[in-house]
Image: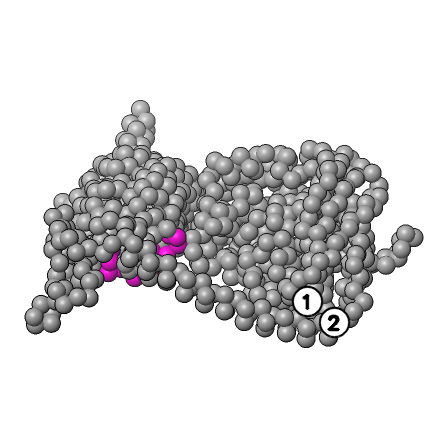
Amino acid sequence: MTTLLHFFFFSSFALLISSISALNSDGILLLSFKYSVLSDPLSVLDNWNYDDLTPCAWRGVTCEDFSGSGTPESLMVVSLVLPNSHLLGSIPQDLGMIPHLRSLDLSNNSLNGSLPPSIFNSSELETLSLSSNVIAGDLPRLISGLKSLKLLNLSDNAFAGKLPESLASLKNLTSISLKNNYFSGSVPGGFDYVEVLDLSFNLFNETLPLDFGGEKLRYLNLSNNKLSGTVSAGFAGKIQANATIDLSFNNLAGEIPQVLSLSKQKTEFFAGNLDLCGKPLSRMCTIPSSLSTPPNVTANGSATAAIAAIPKNMDPSPSSSTTTGAPAVADSHSGSKVKPVKIAAIVAGDLAGIGLLAILFLYAYKLRKKKMNQNQNQNQNPRTKPETKIQESKISKDMSSTRALSSKTCSCLNGVTGDETSETATGSDSDHDNNNLTIDVKGGDKQKCLVIVDGETELEMETLLKASAYVLGSSGPSIVYKAVLGGGNGGGGVAFAVRRIGESGVERMREFENTVKIISKLRHPNLLKVRGFYWGEDEKLVIYDYVSNGSLAGAGYRKAGSSPCQSLPFEVRLKIAKGIAMGLAYIHEKKHVHGNIKPSNILLTLEMEPIISDFGLEWLISGKHSHKAKGSNRHFGSKRSISSREEMMINHDYHHSASSSPYMAPATGLLGCTSPYHAPESMKSLKPNPKWDVYSFGIVLLELISGKVFSERELGEWSASSSDIDDENSILRLVDMSVRTDNNGRRDATLTCFKLGFNCASLDPQKRPSMKEALHVLEKIPFSSC
C-alpha cells in the first residue's frame, strides 16, 4: 500500500513539473505556423522546439515582458519577422490569434493559399508585410478591424476582387502597397490619412474617384491598370502640390485639369494614355472652331486688351482715326462694319492666289518626275515579262472558296523599281493538286528587295516566283507557304517555308533587315534557320528551312485524340524535352527571350528532333522593341484574368487537334496572350524575362510526360502539397497511360522529369531554375534508364 502511495505521489509531482515547464500559449500558436510550412530549405525554423518555455529565443521571434516579472506567462510575442527565408506553405488560422502581435513580416517566401480571417482581428497589428508570395483570394471588409495598422504590403501576390472601401477608413494606415496583383473594379476614395499608395499593375477598370482625398499623400501610383474616363479636378483637388502622381499606361482621356498637383508632374507619369492632352504633356487639346464670339470675349461684349487692340473698322478713311493718329476703337453697335461683298472678295482673292501657287508647284513636280522616269527607263532591261504565274493549293477543304491576296513581285537587290501584283487562288485539299495563281504585273515606284542572310543559300527572285507554293496555315497577320523550288513535276525540289507578313510595325527596310539578321545569327541545331527575306513596303516575306514532320501539337501523346499506334515512346519524349531545353538555353545564353513556347511552335524532324520556331516573329510583326514601354501595354493585350486563363487551360480543343498544322497556331505577341503555356506574370511586365520561357518549358515537359495540360489551379495545388510531389506513387499515377504500362526501368527518369516540370512551372518566378540548370538535370538522365 505504501509503495502504491509513493507511486501516486511521484506521478502527480511529475505531471505538475511538466505543466510548469510546458511552452506558453504564444509559442503553441507559433508552432502551428511551423507545422504548416512544407519546405524550409534554409532551416530557419529548426530551433522552434516544443520543449522550450517560451518562443522568445526562436529565430525571427521578438517578445516583450508585459508585467515585468520575467515569467514565461508574462513574455508575449510581439513580432514575427522571417523575410527571404524560402518558406513554402500557408498561413494558419492560429497565427492571427496571438493577442499582442504587432509586426508580421513573411515577405519574399513561397506562401500560398489565402489570408485567414483571424489575421484581421489582430487589433494591435501595426505592420503586415506579405509581399512576393503566392497568396490569393480577396481582401475582405474585415480589414477595418486592424485599427492599429500603419503599413500594409501585399504586393506581388495573386489577390483579386475589389478593394474594400473600409481600407481608406484606417486612420493610422500611412503606407499601402498592393501592386502586381489582380485587383479590379474601381479605386476607392476617401484616402485622407495615407501618405504612400501603390496600386500599379492591377486590373482596375473603372473611372477615377471624384473625391479621392489625399490631404497627406506624398506618393500615388495607379500606373499600368485599365482605368478609363477623364481626370476630374476633384480627383486631385486635395492632393498636395509636391506629391508624386503616376497615372501612366491606362486608358484615360480628355484634358488634364490644371491643378498644381497634376500640372507639376513629369510627362512620363501620363504616358501611355493616348487620348490625354494638356499640360504637362506636349500634346495640347484641340479648341473647337467658332464663327461667332471670339475667345476671351465676355457676355456683355467687352473684350480683353488683346482683342480690343484690333480695329474693328477696316475703313482707311481719316475719320477712322483720331487726331493723334491712334486707331479708334469702334463701338460694338457702330454702323461702320465691313460689308459681306468685301469679305467675299478678300476670300476669293486669297483662294485664287493659293490655287495659282499649287498649280506652279504641281507643274514643277511633274517635270522632275518625268526626268527621273526617263533616267530609270534607260537603265532597265526592256525585256519585262508581262505576266508571271505561280501555283498554290491549300490543305483545308473548308478553304476551297476563291481568296484574293495582295502581293508584290520581287525585284533586284539594288532597289530598282519592281512591279505591283495581285493574286487570286482557289485551294483544294485532295492531294495538293496545284491551282494556277496568276500575277498581273503593273508599274510601280516602290522599293522591293530580296536579301539572303545566311551566306549559304543561292536563291534568285525569278526562281522564287516560279516555285510551287502551298498554304500551310495562317498565323494572325501572316500566312505561311511551303515553296518548292526546282525538281519539276517529278519531285526532288528544295522546300522552304515562306512566311508572308502583311502588316508590320517595321517601316524601314534597313530596320527590317537588321532584325532578320539578328535572328539569323542565332544558329543552333534546335532552332529554325532563317535563310533570307523579301522586302516590300506593303508586305514582307521571311524564308525559313522547311521542317516536314509537323509539330509537337500534332504528335500523338495527348490523352484525347491519340491512338496507341500514334503514341510517342518515352525515349522520344525525353529526346524532345532535351532538344527544347538545349535550344532555349542557347537563346538565353545569347541574351534573348523567345516568349511564345508552346507545342505548335516546336517542329519535329523525321528523326523526332525538336526545332524551335517563331523566334523573333513578334519583332518582325510589331517592331523589334514592341515589348518596351512606347505607349500603353494595352496595345498588345490586357492582363488576363485568372478565370479566363483557367477556361483557356481547361478547354481541351485549344490547338490540340492531332491533325492541326504546325503553322496554324494563332500568332500572339510577347504580351496579351491567354495561352496556358505563358507565365502568369507575363501580363504584368513590359519587359520579357527568361523565366517566362522556363515556365512554358515546364508546362510542355509536364504535358509530354502526362499527356495533359496542367492548369494554374492544379499547379498551385501541387505546390501547396509538396508531400504529394515527394510521394512517388502520386506522381506515377499522372504518367500517360500509353507509356505507364511499360514503365519498368524508367521510374527514376519519370520522377525526375515530373519534379523538374513542377519546378520550372512554379508560380513564383524566383523558384524556377534557369534553362541551363534544367538542361543539366535532363542530361543526367541516361537513355538506358528509359
Left/right placement of residue 537 relative to residue 121 reads right
Quarter of the image where the N terminus is located:
top left
- Residue tagged 2: 380
Report if residue 557 is visible in the image.
no
**Mark 2 Cα-neighbour bin, 10 Å: few <14, some 14–19, many ≥20:** few
Q: Position of residue 660 (x, y in %)?
A: 71, 41
Residue 417 is marked as 1
**Mark 1 Cα-neighbour bin, 10 Å: few <14, some 14–19, many ≥20:** some
Using the image as rendered, state which of residue 413 and residue 311 is in the foreground.
311
Report if residue 381 is visible in the image.
yes
Q: Which residues are magenta?
A: 261-274
Left/right placement of residue 627 relative to residue 244 reads right
Q: Secondary structure at mark 1?
A: loop
The residue depicted at 28 percent of the width and 31 percent of the height is 12
The residue depicted at 30 percent of the width and 29 percent of the height is 8
Going from N to C along the chain, the mark reached first, 1 or 2, is 2
**Farthest-out residue, right:** 490
Q: Give the amino acid type for the residue marked by disc 1 in the picture.
A: Thr
Q: Give the amino acid type for the residue marked by disc 2 in the picture.
A: Gln
Q: Is residue 268 magenta?
A: yes
